[in-house]
């Protein structure tokens, strides 16, 4: 049996090549953008496949088309996110106006592809895609507003932005197999996205993606700002544009690392990890799929 990533990648190539309504320029850009993302794998499509397999007595080959459609939607969201944040080196940032059209084409192609499959529950799957995509867009809006400045509102935002998409990948596979969804799959699917979105590494790198330098809020920064010390006061002033001098990188990094901020964020991740694992125990996914989902929870 072919590797699942290979199956999904081949299905993507076929979808792009056979889309007669795409002009040659759009098709060429879409192919190149897809190739850039191929190296990171197709985690959302694989979640879709494994959940379909878990609840289905036989495999309909159209599931690879659906997995590819899910990846098209996710890639479109990645492109739009990068164009809004302006913090990636992907080629689509070089021509944002043209790239936006490619992202819009991917969104339409995702639903169109699912609708053209032979699944009896495809309309339920499309409804799920629409619902969870809108939830993610709401989360992205909150993220761009940069107004989530406490733990509860921040977790709610990343649940919408990221958790909605990972839950969608799992639930589409389930609903195609049996026409309904379960709370267990929805919950751990959502928690996978939360865990993936809690970023710690970027704070350790003082570069263009550093949330603190960009005055973005994240769980470690929220924790740091809640402390009443010289560093937190300096960071607060920096965020409020009260000072124009540069932050003391060494002192701030030390406060994040040794002052409990990063440990706090890791603790939050572990809380959701254990919740997800408890739900995952009750779902009959094969061992390969289970190990992959567990890997996403690290």
Image (cartoon, rainbow, N blue to C red):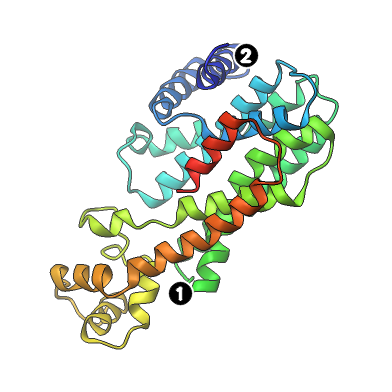
Residue with the mark numbered 2: 20
Residue with the mark numbered 1: 149
Q: Is residue 202 above or below residue 124?
A: below
Q: Nearer the viewer, residue 148 or 180?
A: 180
- Expressed as whole percent of the image width and height from the top left, the position of residue 194 reads 53, 55
Element class at badge 1: loop
Residue shown at the point (45%, 74%) measured from the top left: 149
Q: Nearer the viewer, residue 224 or 101?
A: 224
Q: Is residue 274 above or below residue 154?
A: above
Q: Which mark is residue 106?
A: none
**Left or right, 115 with reference to 257:** right
Q: Is residue 271 above or below residue 39?
A: below
- Label pair 1/2, CB-CB below 8 angstroms: no
Residue 19: in sight, yes or no? Answer: yes
Element class at badge 2: loop
- Expressed as whole percent of the image width and height from the top left, the position of residue 95 reads 36, 34
């Amino acid at each position: 049996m072919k590797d699942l990533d290979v199956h999904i990648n081949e299905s993507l190539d076929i979808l792009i090549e056979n889309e007669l309504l795409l002009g040659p320029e759009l098709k060429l850009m879409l192919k190149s953008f897809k190739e850039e993302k191929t190296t990171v794998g197709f985690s959302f499509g694989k979640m879709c496949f494994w959940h379909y397999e878990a609840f289905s007595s036989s495999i309909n080959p159209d599931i690879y088309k659906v997995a590819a459609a899910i990846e098209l939607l996710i890639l479109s969201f990645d492109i739009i996110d990068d164009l809004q944040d302006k913090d990636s080196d992907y080629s689509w940032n070089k021509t944002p106006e043209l790239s936006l059209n490619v992202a819009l084409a991917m969104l339409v192609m995702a639903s169109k592809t699912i609708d053209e499959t032979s699944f009896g529950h495809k309309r339920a799957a499309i409804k799920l895609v629409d619902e969870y995509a809108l939830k993610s867009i709401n989360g992205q809006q909150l993220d761009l507003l940069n107004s989530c400045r406490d733990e509860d509102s921040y977790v709610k935002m990343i649940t919408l932005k990221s958790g909605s998409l990972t839950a969608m990948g799992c639930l589409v596979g389930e609903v195609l197999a049996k026409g309904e969804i379960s709370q267990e799959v929805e919950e751990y699917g959502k928690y996978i996205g939360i865990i993936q979105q809690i970023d710690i590494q970027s704070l350790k790198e003082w570069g263009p993606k550093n949330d603190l330098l960009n005055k973005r809020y994240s769980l470690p920064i929220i924790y740091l700002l809640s402390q009443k010390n010289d560093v937190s006061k300096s960071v607060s002033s920096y965020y409020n544009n009260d000072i124009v001098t540069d932050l003391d990188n060494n002192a701030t990094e030390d406060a994040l690392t040794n002052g409990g901020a990063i440990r706090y964020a890791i603790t939050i991740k572990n809380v959701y990890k254990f919740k997800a694992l408890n739900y995952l125990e009750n779902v009959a996914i094969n061992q390969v799929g289970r190990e992959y989902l567990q890997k996403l929870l690290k």
